[in-house]
């Protein structure tokens, strides 16, 4: 599809098209081309940090497996009291899954102990593609897996053979769109950065209309905050696509809003990656690889000149703020004219990062000349 030439286009939703502030500032210069982040795309890559990212992922995976095994307890109940002594209550119950639970826990213990001791041995790299494989013969009561066997296939078989319930976090590992393999091994994946001009506005406006659903979907009451993302000169977007054509553009299978932020104390600028969508609420394990790839992309384009932080790391992100600019100030000042509280139109921030005044950064046109 062709990117709309103006926010007045019928391709935009009514609440964007009718917003006078958005119309006034749709040509607003964004900061990103000035720091090396022009609208661009690269093949999906973890770069030099790939193996380090895989190790972080592996540790998250190990913790997930440990927790899932710990939750599989024997629920059998035994009582020395007779039925007469305890009335009509249940005084004896046999958990028929107890043997499977024990076998599952033992198998997980063997696997995770090796992951703890020698995590590097699980990582293999061939033709630039990172894979996770078994560095030893993994024996379970149901099936044995040889050295070099795909780690995820072994884990999936272990989960299936156990026939246990309540392994929801394990199950999430094998969802096509959340899996490690889907991100690293799918052919044709590209990372796209967009933040300037008509394409930047459209990509921000359609961030939840191209395969990823969130509160920024146009039908959602919170989507009014898209206005703030469009006119904020310090907001852009990064996403992963395999160029499948959808009604509103190429598909997005992972995405984050990108922000130019400033440290509260040192006043040094940084780049913040907002929460990755679709977000993994099971401990963010599936976000790790995407985050490594996004960091690598941004670092490469900006030549490593800026510290890169992740918005979901509140311990770090709370030390930063977004500089207030004329477009954002005007949006806040006029929200009541559109029958809205200002917070409903300001760019939606999962990180909870705040806007604040900063004379040095209030005018983008004067920066990085």
Image: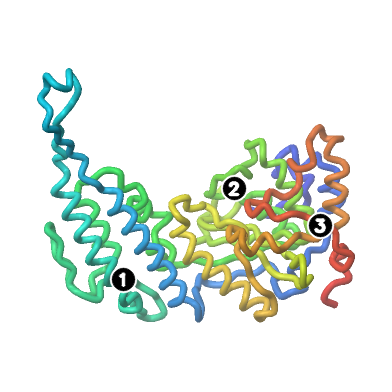
Percent x, y of residue 200:
71, 59
Q: Distance between the residues labelled 2 and 3?
A: 27 Å
Q: Nearer the viewer, mark 1 or mark 2?
A: 1
Percent x, y of residue 259:
70, 62
Looking at the image, is mark 1 or mark 2 earlier in the sequence? Answer: 1
Q: Do the residues labelled 2 and 3 touch (CB within 8 Å)?
A: no
Looking at the image, is mark 3 or mark 1 earlier in the sequence? Answer: 1
SS for dot 2: loop
Left or right side of 328 for 229: left
Residue at 86% over, 51% down: 329
The foreground one among 13 and 234 is 234
Q: Are there few (<14), some (14-19), or many (20+) residues within 10 Å of tag 2?
A: many
- According to the picture, the residue beneath numbered tag 3 turns out to be 356
- According to the picture, the residue beneath numbered tag 1 turns out to be 115
Q: Nearer the viewer, mark 2 or mark 3?
A: 3
Looking at the image, is mark 2 or mark 3 earlier in the sequence? Answer: 2
Left or right side of 155 for 360: right
Left or right side of 366 for 73: left
Left or right side of 88 for 219: right
Q: Are there few (<14), some (14-19), or many (20+) residues within 10 Å of tag 3?
A: some
Q: Are there few (<14), some (14-19), or many (20+) residues within 10 Å of tag 1?
A: many
Q: How far apart are marks 3 and 1 (CA)?
A: 45 Å
Q: Residue 43 carries which label?
A: none
| Quarter of the figure with the C terminus | bottom right
Q: Distance between the residues labelled 1 and 2?
A: 37 Å
The foreground one among 120 and 221 is 120
Is 51 rendered above or below residue 265?
below
- According to the picture, the residue beneath numbered tag 2 turns out to be 208
Is 65 rendered above or below residue 307?
above
Percent x, y of residue 173:
36, 55
Tell me where residue 147 sits by quadrant. bottom left
Residue at 75% over, 38% down: 15
């Amino acid at each position: 599809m062709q990117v709309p030439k103006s926010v007045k286009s019928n391709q935009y939703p009514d609440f964007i098209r009718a917003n006078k502030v958005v119309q006034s500032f749709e040509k607003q210069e964004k900061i990103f081309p000035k720091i090396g982040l022009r609208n661009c795309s690269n093949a999906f890559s973890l770069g030099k940090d790939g193996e380090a990212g895989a190790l972080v992922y592996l540790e998250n995976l190990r913790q997930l497996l440990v927790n899932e095994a710990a939750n599989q307890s024997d629920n059998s109940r035994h009582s020395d009291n007779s039925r007469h002594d305890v009335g009509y209550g249940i005084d004896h119950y046999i958990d028929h899954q107890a043997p499977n639970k024990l076998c599952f826990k033992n198998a997980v213990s063997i696997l995770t102990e090796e992951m703890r001791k020698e995590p590097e041995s699980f990582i293999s790299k061939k033709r630039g593609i990172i894979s996770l494989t078994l560095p030893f013969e993994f024996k379970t009561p149901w099936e044995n897996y040889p050295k070099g066997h795909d780690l995820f296939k072994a884990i999936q078989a272990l989960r299936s053979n156990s026939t246990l319930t309540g392994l929801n976090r394990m199950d999430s590992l094998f969802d096509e769109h959340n899996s490690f393999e889907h991100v690293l091994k799918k052919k044709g994946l590209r990372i796209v950065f967009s933040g300037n001009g008509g394409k930047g506005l459209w990509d921000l406006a359609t961030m939840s209309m191209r395969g990823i659903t969130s509160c920024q979907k146009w039908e959602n009451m919170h989507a009014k905050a898209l206005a703030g993302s469009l006119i904020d000169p310090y907001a852009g977007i990064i996403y992963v696509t395999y160029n499948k054509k959808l009604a509103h553009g190429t598909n997005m299978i992972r995405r984050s809003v990108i922000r130019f932020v400033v440290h509260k104390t040192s006043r040094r600028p940084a780049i913040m990656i907002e929460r990755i969508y679709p977000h993994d609420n099971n401990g963010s394990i599936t976000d790790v690889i995407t985050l490594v790839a996004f960091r690598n992309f941004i670092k490469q384009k900006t030549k490593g000149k800026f510290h890169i932080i992740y918005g979901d790391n509140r311990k770090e992100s709370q030390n930063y703020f977004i500089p207030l600019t004329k477009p954002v100030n005007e949006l806040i000042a006029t929200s009541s004219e559109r029958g809205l509280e200002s917070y409903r139109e300001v760019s939606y921030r999962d990180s909870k990062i705040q806007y604040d005044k900063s004379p040095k950064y209030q005018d983008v046109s004067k920066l990085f000349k």
